[in-house]
Amino acid sequence: MAKTYDAIVIGTGQAGPSLAVRLAGAGKKVAVIERHLFGGTCVNTGCIPTKTMVASAYAAHLARRAAEYGVDVGGPVTVDMKRVKARKDAVSGQSRTGVEAWLRGTKNVTVYEGQARFESAREISIGMERLTAPQIFINVGGRAVVPPMPGLDQVPYLSNSSMMAVDFLPRHLLIVGGSYIGLEFGQMFRRFGSEVTIIEMASRLISREDEDVSATVREILEAEGVHIRLNAKCIAVSKAGDEIAASVDCTDGPPTVVGSHLLLAVGRRPNTDDLALEKAGVEVDKRGYIMVDDQLRTSAPGIWALGDCNGRARSRTLPTTTMRSSPRTFWTAIRGR
């Protein structure tokens, strides 16, 4: 027998918890489902932990420049990566436990832990449990893309998530991907003391930005000692003894770069492939992003998709002809007024 709620929120990223608490405050009985870490990407592997590490990297960078400000630090600046990681874990952990405690302590909210799957447009399963509600909100976020790169099955590699477990200083970090995530980690680990090479297939970094922005970012990174390899059209990796060789086939520079560690930063994909969305009639695009209208409604009435899984930033929206014509705002609509 399914347990009945007024609303079900799947995922506890940035949108889900606030929405659940607000719905509960309006008198609705809400179920919240989380399969892994409370707080989602931002709290656990994104904004909060990476910016905490960026702050540590900036402190090291500033300490090395102390003499420019008339300050003597008394010797070479060194970085203890175990302490950097411990600080990051403490900050991130405080946020994660805070989100969980907030949800569990909110009246009218029931928290479930496990993998959610649609059984129909109104019913969700979590293992043997069954929940049903007239309104369901999907807030499952995304994860790093692993590209079909030749040789990748033969070498160890890191993603933005597994980088959060690194408590040592890579001798030479190879980063495939010259967009926001790759550049952030590149500058960060260069300031920690690693040699860093960023490998990008396009002709410039962060190619979605204006050309002058790309050029300025490159100048800043190269001034700090980051190696940039552009126009890497045929990237492949292989073992080179205890290290990793990346064949980059660039127009400038040696065709191969050898490093100690490899970070893949080539994009993100939504965590939608194991929700059984087809059972609910929820449409996705060819990359798995849930298609929504301008009020975040999916193709299935009563189901909304929030955050990174809906592709709004990538303009993956439902055609106007499929949008329901109600003039009510998103919040008014989900309260059923």
Image: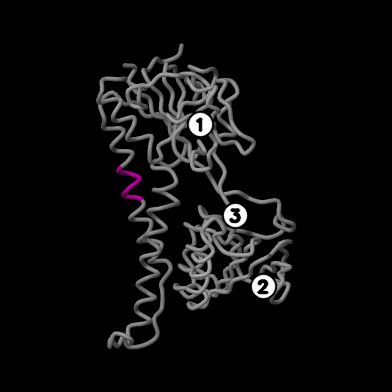
Residue type highlighted by circle 3? Val
In this orientation, which residue lies closer to the viewer: 12 or 268? Answer: 268
**Residue 96: in magenta span:** yes
Q: Which residue is mark 2?
A: 258
Q: Which of the two discs, 3 and 1, labels the residue nearer the N terminus?
A: 1
Q: Residues within 10 Å of mark 1 (few under 14, many from 20)?
A: some
Task: Please report contact status of discs 2 and 3: CB closer than 8 Å, yes or no.
Answer: no
Q: Residues within 10 Å of mark 2 (few under 14, many from 20)?
A: some
Residue 21 against residue 281 in the figure, above or below: below
Q: Which residue is mark 3?
A: 266
- Check disc 1 and report its element: helix, strand or loop: loop
Residue in view at x 71 percent, y 55 percent = 149
In this orientation, which residue lies closer to the viewer: 315 or 210? Answer: 210
In this orientation, which residue lies closer to the viewer: 41 or 281? Answer: 281
Measure the C-alpha gap from mark 2 to mark 3. Answer: 19 Å
Quadrant in the rendering for residue 5: top left
Q: Is residue 217 left or right of residue 73?
A: right
Measure the C-alpha gap from mark 2 to mark 1. Answer: 40 Å
Magenta range: 93-98
Residue in view at x 40 percent, y 56 percent = 49
